[in-house]
Image: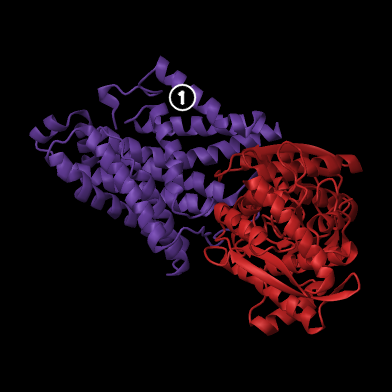
Chain colours: A red, B purple
Amino acid sequence: MRAVLCGILVVCLALVGCAGGGKSDTVKVGWFGPLTGDNALWGQSELNTVKMMFEDFNAKGGIEVGGKKYKLEVIGYDDKGDGTEAVNVAKRLTSQDKVVAVLGPNGSGEAIPVAPIMNEAKVPLIATVATNPKVTVREDGTLNKFMFRDCFIDPYQGAVAATYAYEKLGKRKAAIFMSVDDQYSAGLTQYFEETFTKLGGKVVEKVSFTSGEKEFRAPLTKIKAADPDIIFSPNYYTDVSLSAKQARELGIKCIMMGGDGWPSDNLIPLAGDALEGSYCVNHLDFEDPAVKPFKDAYTAKYKIPPELNGYMVHDAVVMLVDAMQRAKSFDGTKLAEALESCDVQGITGRIKINPATHNPEGKEAAMLKIVGPKLVFVEKFAAK
Amino acid sequence: MVQFLQQLVNGLSIGSVYALMAVGYSLVYSIMNFSNFAHGAVIMLGAYFGFYSLTLLRLPFGVSFVLAAVGTGLVAVLLERLAYKPLRERRAPFLYFIITAMGASIFIENLVVATIGPTYKTYPAVFGQGPIQLGALSIGRIDLTMFVVSAISLTALMIFIDRTKMGKAIQASAYNMKASALMGINTDRVIIIVFALGGALAGVAGVLFGMKYLVYPQIGNITNKSFIAAVFGGLGSLPGALIGSVLLALIETFVSGYLSSQYRDLIGFVILIAMLVVRPTGIMGKSAEDKA
């Protein structure tokens, strides 16, 4: 039954694709994400951004695809931040609404279960902040042909941190302070270690702790004995600030570095001045001049500044429009092919999709530095 | 060598806080013969009392310490009156005491989550941040304070138990509650004093712990360690609780310092089990005479 439906769907899509060239001049694009529940703010920020951008395109007469102008229409559904609900709305978007592509969702927990649906329906999807590697490449190593994203995956932050520490900060001896039972920490550590060693640096000590722990001095004393000039701490802000304080008590003076687990309103109140001069990697910074025009336009329209999700979905739209124009078609398979060779400049950085993984490769991250009571944007930086 | 000494310092400072907590368990156990699992919740309240008297009332550090100790002493006595006394009067089995203690602990923890909230809080910097340098050895100011305050509190407790009339009454009650009552000792008052003492030490431990790490509703979980230390040293024996705490902390520190923190609890608890198999009464084997 499903196969039949699917077949019909493919035919329909193909027809829509062909028909698009003739009479219809409105193209439907799907979006789903949380509009209610804990993460509602993120979802609303995404949908508002897509609506705002489509209105702008349409006000200018639409986008030009294959020599003809088309208007864009977004069909947005609430997935309540839930995987099962995401599957339902993804089915509805692909089978009933017959959208040509889907933007979102923002979370890996919703993106991973919809992958089979998108692959079956042959409708490409561009996830926004779904950072889990399994969104695009399944556990057994096979590629989800219709799944894309415009954020970098978790472990990539480790490579960015290592390159920045080695090239920009001139650090040569790194110590790693990682959480032993956390996948995020392990992923960042692996990439940091590989990259830093490849560049010519040396990892002089690697110690671990168990999450939930509050006493870190024993492993930190080991780090002190190794005398590193930077400590990589790929952990969440509570562990980061507490361990930094204890490191200072032990007389460890070198700076620290971490990933997007650091940025939090609580980081510096908890750490005091123990992290002064340290760096962390984030997806982007709201103070970055490149995002200012979008931020201002959004804030003027909705009277509230966009969340990280707004910026990310902005670039997902940029990717999709670029793919439509290069494919000169709205056919799902052709769009997916175009997305595989995507190389566009978004406001969150340059997005160059690796056809083997469907992840943006070498995307710039925002480097933040702790100065006094603030996380200050330093520059954008990418690992090779 | 420097690393060894540094780990020794780390271990001693952790051990001194374990000791403050473990002594509270041992005191109550020696009199009532049950493990007061609500002790962890009282320690947590101590950390909050100290935090608020420093930040909200802006009282000086010393006063905050005393205030927290008095506050938790009162809480512990209140707990005894409300939760344990009715059980005692009905001669309930010891299991009921333990269940009541666990219930009280969960109640207090959730009360704090519901009223104050689950977020982490940090003590204002009471001492300068920089460590005291002894050659290549760094000794944290808070660690030093922890060690000194623990030592003073524990010595005061020992003197109280050894030299005062009430102390003698506590020892007698620990030896035999019924006989002591027959000899004219007011055992009900002894129990109140024991809870007040244990509670006050819990308050001191709570403030020290909060200062050193963070303040949050689950602080009480750390007392699992001090309970183990109390068993290790010999439940019911004060010097035992002390030695057990310092030993456990040293073992933990050296294992995570020289092997890996993954093995820390593994090795610590294997030693504990081995100890109990060979010598079930703990290090300071509790023969009836030296209880308390």
**x then y, percent, for residue B218:** 45, 49
Question: For residue A195, which quarter of the picture?
Answer: top right
Residue for badge 1: B272
Using a 10 Å C-alpha cutoff, classify the residue at mark 1 as few (fewer than 14 neighbours), some (14 to 19) or many (20 or more). Answer: some
Q: Nearer the viewer, residue A4 or B150?
A: A4
Q: Quadrant of residue A277?
A: bottom right
> For the view shown, which residue lies furthest in the top direction?
B278
Asked if one can make out residue A85 in the rendered structure from this viewpoint, the answer is: yes
A284 displayed left or right of B117? right
Q: Amino acid at mark 1?
A: Leu
At mark 1, the secondary structure is helix
> Which of the two residues, A182 or A299, is positioned nearer the viewer here?
A299
Q: Position of residue B69 (x, y in %)?
A: 36, 54
Instruction: Determine whether A204 is above or below B41 in the image.
Output: above
Q: Nearer the viewer, residue A137 or A254?
A: A137
Q: Is residue B238 above or below residue A138?
A: above
Instruction: Give the residue displayed 86% in from the left and 52% down from the top.
Output: A383
Q: Is residue A103 left or right of residue B146?
A: right
Relative height, residue B176 to residue B213 (above, below):
above
**A207 up-or-down from A354: above or below:** above
Residue at 60 percent of width and 32 percent of height? B262
What x and y, as percent, mark residue A142?
76, 40
Seen at 42% across and 27% down, the residue is: B232
Q: Nearer the viewer, residue B112 or B48?
A: B112
- Chain ID, mark 1: B
> Percent position (x, y) of residue B142?
55, 51
Q: Is residue B120 left or right of residue B285?
A: right
What count of labels does the image hold? 1
Instruction: Judge whether residue A278 can be spotted in this image.
Output: no
